[in-house]
Amino acid sequence: MKRMIVLGQPNAGKTLFTLNFAAYLDLESVTINFTNYERGCYSKTLSIAEAKSLLVSDTAHHTRDIQTLTLTLPWGKGEKQFELVDTTGLTDGINHDEEIRRAMAQTLRFMRQADIIFHLLDCARIAKVGLLKGIGEIDYQIAQFGQLKRGYLILANKIDLPNAKDGLEKIIQEFPGNRIIRISALTQKGFKEVKNYAKKLL
Ligand SMILES: Nc1nc2c(ncn2[C@@H]2O[C@H](COP(=O)(O)OP(=O)(O)OP(=O)(O)O)[C@@H](O)[C@H]2O)c(=O)[nH]1
Ligand SMILES: [Mg+2]
C-alpha cells in the first residue's frame, strides 16, 4: 500500500487537510492509527467532526503523534487503498521541549519511509510575515528530500484567506519546477486536483 505523508511547519493545516480530504473522499468517520514515540500504537474511530474538534487547533504543535488514515480511491474498475499520514509540525532549530523534539524525530523517520510527500505551506502566513520568516530552512530541506521520492507535491494552503495570493506568488518563486496546487484545507478548494495527482501515483 502506498504511503502519502503530510509534512510542513506547525499550524500549516496538515491535520485539517488530512481530515477534510477523508471527508472529500466521502467518509463520515475515520479510524485513526496513532503512533506515539513513547506510548506506542493505538487506534480510535471518530466521526470527522469529532476528529476535527479534537485534533485541529490554532495552537502550534498540537499534533505530536503520527496519525495514519487508510483511505481508498477509485482505480480502474475497482478501488485501491493508500495511507495518508499526518505528522508533527517541523521547525528550524532545536525545540526546548523534549516531547516536541522526539515527535519531530519520529516524523523524520516516517518521512524516509513514505512514497509520496504532500508538503503544506501556509500562503496567508507567508504573505503576512514575508518570505524569510514564512518559509523556513526546513521547507527547503523537505523540498530537496521530496525530489528523491516517487511523488512530491506542494500544497499552498489557506488560499481562502485575504492576501493569500501574495504568499502563493512567493511560493511559486521559491520552488520553481515543482508541482504546486493551491488549496484550502478549510473549504476543500483544490482537493479535486490533489485527488487526481494521488490517483496517478497509486
Ligand atoms: N482559513 C483557513 N484556516 C485553516 C486552513 N487550514 C488550516 N486552518 C486553520 O489553521 C489552524 C491550524 O490547523 P491544523 O490543521 O491544526 O494545523 P497543523 O499543521 O496540523 O498544526 P500542528 O499539528 O500544530 O503541526 C487551525 O485553526 C485551522 O482551522 C485553511 O485552509 N483556511
Ligand atoms: Mg496537526
Image: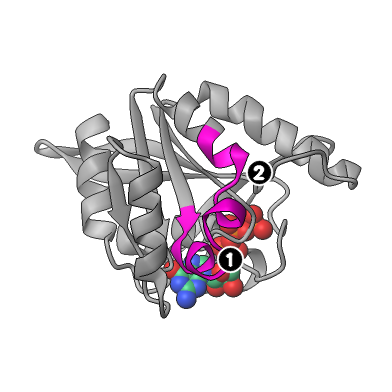
Q: Position of residue 1 (x, y in %)?
A: 38, 27
Q: Which mark is residue 171?
A: none
Closer to the chain start, of discs 1 and 2, is 2
Q: Residue at x 38, y 67 (%)?
A: 166
How many C-alpha atoms fall within 10 Å of the one at disc 1: few (<14), some, or many (≥20)?
Answer: few
Residue 115 visible in image:
yes
Q: Camera-side residue: 75 or 122? A: 122
Q: Position of residue 145 (x, y in %)?
A: 49, 25
Q: In the rendered structure, which amino acid carries the disc numbered 2?
A: Leu
**Residue at mark 1:** 129
Asked if 199 appears above or below 109 in the picture, the reply is: below
Q: Is residue 168 magenta?
A: no
Colour scheme employed for the rendering of this structure? one colour
Which of discs 1 and 2 lies nearer the camera? The answer is: 1
Q: Residue at x 42, y 72 (%)?
A: 186
How many C-alpha atoms fall within 10 Å of the one at disc 2: few (<14), some, or many (≥20)?
Answer: many
Q: In the rendered structure, which amino acid carries the disc numbered 1?
A: Val
Asked if 71 appears above or below 178 in the picture, the reply is: below
Q: Camera-side residue: 113 or 173? A: 173
Q: Position of residue 132 (x, y in %)?
A: 58, 52
Q: Is residue 181 left or right of residue 51?
A: left
Q: Residue at x 43, y 68 (%)?
A: 158
Asked if 72 appears above or below 11 in the picture, the reply is: above
Label 1 close to label 2 by CB (< 8 Å): no
**Residue at mark 2:** 90
Residue numbers of the magenta segment: 121-140
Q: Position of residue 80 (x, y in %)?
A: 27, 36
Q: Camera-side residue: 152 or 25? A: 152
Q: Secondary structure at mark 2?
A: loop
| Mark 2 within 8 Å of ligand 1, using the beta carbon | no
Q: Main secondary structure of the magenta part?
A: helix
